[in-house]
Amino acid sequence: MEYFTDKKRDGFKGERMIVLPVETFSAYANHPLVRRMFLTDVGFFPKAEHHDRNRKEGIEEYIFLYCTAGKGTVVMGRNTFHLGANDALCIPRHTGHHYFADNADPWSLLWVHFKGEDTKNYPLEEKRLIHFESEYAANRMHFLFDLLFRVLDANYTEGNFIYISQVLQLILSETYYREKSGGAQPQHKRITEIIRYMGRHIEQNLTLEELSEIFGISKSYLNAVFQEYTQHAPLEFFSHLKMKRACSLLRSTQAPVYEIAAGLGYEDPYYFSRAFKKIVGVSPKEYRNSEYFHYEE
């Protein structure tokens, strides 16, 4: 492939760099899926000795840096960040900055410049250093950047530009939104454990006392954390899980309503039907016969 490059080339051994002339692909850039997240430059500088960038006014795009090895420093005004292996940082657009590789142990750097409508959905203005602790997270980042290079090595088509936009979203989501190892609060982990337990015992009629005893927490605390994180009391949430399972069975099987009710712990099918209508909005029979009705909480 013939790379589009400009004077920014540093000449690091083994480097990769692709610069897309936006004006050439303006039709693609205006596609509703592409303009949400549009890549302009992407590269990899391995062991980038003497790598140094100083832009007093910043640039038009966001700059995402991911250090794969070695060390480097990023300065933005009064903020100084020291990047090491598996550290990521985003430099906001129009933000003056100076970044450079460590003299003794220069960084290997994956980087991408981008802009788009969906940048507002990520905390890109926070100037926050993110560290990926697990090997799996680091491997995912390498894989996602490799996808960018592979697609850009292929043809410049509208479909590939849409694909690149989605990969960029994944890189940012992996950085800012995917739960880091050990990052979840204890309450989140406990809620997740309880919800999974409910799912495995969907056919039972669990009580608050049973859940409290099984998970070694008080009924009041159990109620409080469920209300905070699900906006439902525990048993109310359990009922919603049952009704979601019922909806799935009504759509995917021809099992009689009374069998579905019994399989979800309801001995009285009439009571089940009343509970179903209260939560879903229509009776089980009406739900099954409707092609357009979908239950949403």
Image (cartoon, rainbow, N blue to C red):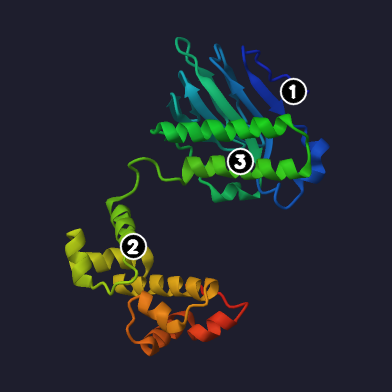
Residue 41 in view: no
Where disc 2 sits, the SS reads helix
Q: Nearer the viewer, mark 2 or mark 3?
A: 2
Where disc 3 sits, the SS reads helix
Q: On screen, 285 above or below 224?
A: below
Determine the CA span between mark 1 and mark 3: 20 Å
Residue 200 is labelled as 2
Residue plotted at (78% across, 32% down): 21
The first of marks 1 and 2 along the sequence is 1
The first of marks 1 and 3 along the sequence is 1
Where disc 1 sits, the SS reads loop
Q: On screen, 193 above or below 182?
A: below
Residue 5 is labelled as 1
How far across and down, in percent of the image, does residue 235 sit? Answer: 30, 73
CB atoms of marks 1 and 2 within 8 Å: no
Determine the CA span between mark 2 and mark 3: 36 Å
Q: Which residue is labeled 3 in the image?
A: 168
Q: On screen, 102 above or below 112?
A: above
